[in-house]
Amino acid sequence: MNILETNASDQEMIRESAIDFAKREIEPLKMKWDEAQEFPIEVFKKMGHMGFMGVLVPEIYGGSGLGYQEYITIIDEISQVCGGIGLSLAAHNSLCTNHILSFGNEEQKHLYLPKLASGEWIGAWGLTETGSGSDAGGMQTTARKEGEYYIINGSKNFITHAISGDITVLMARTGDEGDSHSMSAFIIEKGTPGFSSGKKEDKLGMRASETAGLFLDNCRVHESQRIGEEGQGFIQALKLLEGGRISIGALALGIAKGALKSALAYTQERKQFKKPIAKFQAVRFDLADMATEIEASELLIRNAAKLKMKGKSTAKQSAMAKLYASETAVKVSTKALQLFGGYGYSKEYPVEKYYRDAMLCTIGEGTSNIQKMVIAKELLK
């Protein structure tokens, strides 16, 4: 199915398939995974069969051959049920898989994309380090050329799927520190000598999405595993993050929608002074504000996706979408929790999970302040 040929009925079918999958495969177990901080690999393999693990990958490489509008819809619907599953789905598609799709050579694409798109393999992406979060240009992981191999040393932090990922696209410095043309991207398979993962992070939210560190100790990687030319890794990463921010916007959108749905249902059931609290004007105003900000978020996200599909730069639009949608998710989930009163603070109701999951959206793939820096830079060009 080509995105240029999809119509409203096709997109609605995609939405319904995501809704059905989330209700059947995720809803019954999401709190179990959250409590145990369990990354349910089998669910991702099932999503591979559904075509959700290679949404943007062309059919020639085993993917679904869809575009960003469909991708947003899938992430949105999955995240309305569980933000952790939505986050891992977004990271797999937008970062590892899309890096190889966007910048890999044909041999790399044919070797790795079918496995990633089918869900046979889980993908990870390594940019962040302990001392270089927002300052990615200050990374300390190095790759020294030795014959046909690169010897990589260093570590990465807060990496999604660091433990379970079958392959990782990882950035390392091949030149001088601070030079944006001194970093290169490498595909490293799990089990490569000198390549290991650390302990799983014990997180506030998104607990079904696995996060850990990666360690490289004289890890030998053949030059055929480098993506693109030497020194282009950071430039590639910046371009990828434009699309990645659209996906995090969609993740935040789904979390906000889930929180609003919970609040709408609860405020019509909960009675005070012999009538549902949804009858009170103050509650109605809260619900109206929540719904308005959610709709504004979706318009920003859909607009960025439209430009992306036209092949235009979306640096400003993606940053705006991610900034607004992520901050909206926090505000909406906070307000929803307050509308539940004391019950909102209890795990008996789902709203506390939306509240915990939402905050990550303002941090991952660039904090809110980083988004503002990107937007301002684009405005002042």
Image: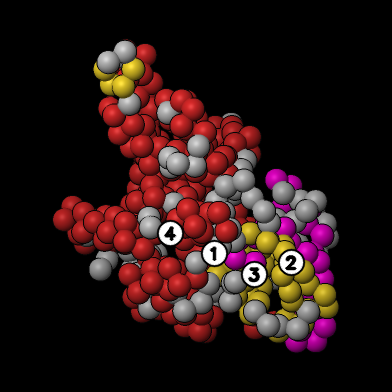
Kindly state the secondary structure of the residue where label 3 is placed.
Answer: loop
- Of tags 1 and 2, which is closer to the observer? 1
**How far apart are labels 1 and 3 at the CA level?**
10 Å
- Residue 247 visible to an observer of this rendering: no
The N terminus: image quadrant: bottom left
The image's mark for residue 39 is: 1
User: Measuring 45% from the left and 41% from the top, which residue is drawn there?
Assistant: 348
Of all residues shown, which one is farthest toward the front? 274
The image's mark for residue 198 is: 2
Q: Earlier in the sequence, mark 4 or mark 3?
A: 4
Q: Residues within 10 Å of mark 3 (few under 14, many from 20)?
A: many
Q: Are marks 3 and 2 in contact (CB under 8 Å)?
A: no
Mark 3 lies on residue: 163
Q: Which residues are magenta?
A: 134-163
Q: Residues within 10 Å of mark 2 (few under 14, many from 20)?
A: some
Residue type (three-letter) at the residue carrying disc 2 = Gly
User: Measuring 77% from the left and 69% from the top, which residue is drawn there?
Assistant: 215
Q: Are marks 1 and 3 in contact (CB under 8 Å)?
A: yes
Kindly state the secondary structure of the residue where label 4 is placed.
Answer: loop
Q: Is residue 186 above or below residue 376?
A: below
- Residue 329 within the magenta-colored segment of the rendering: no
- Residue 160 within the magenta-colored segment of the rendering: yes
Q: From the top left corner, tell me how far across and down residue 332 is, in percent.
A: 44, 31
Residue type (three-letter) at the residue carrying disc 4 = Leu
Mark 4 lies on residue: 29
Q: Earlier in the sequence, mark 4 or mark 1?
A: 4
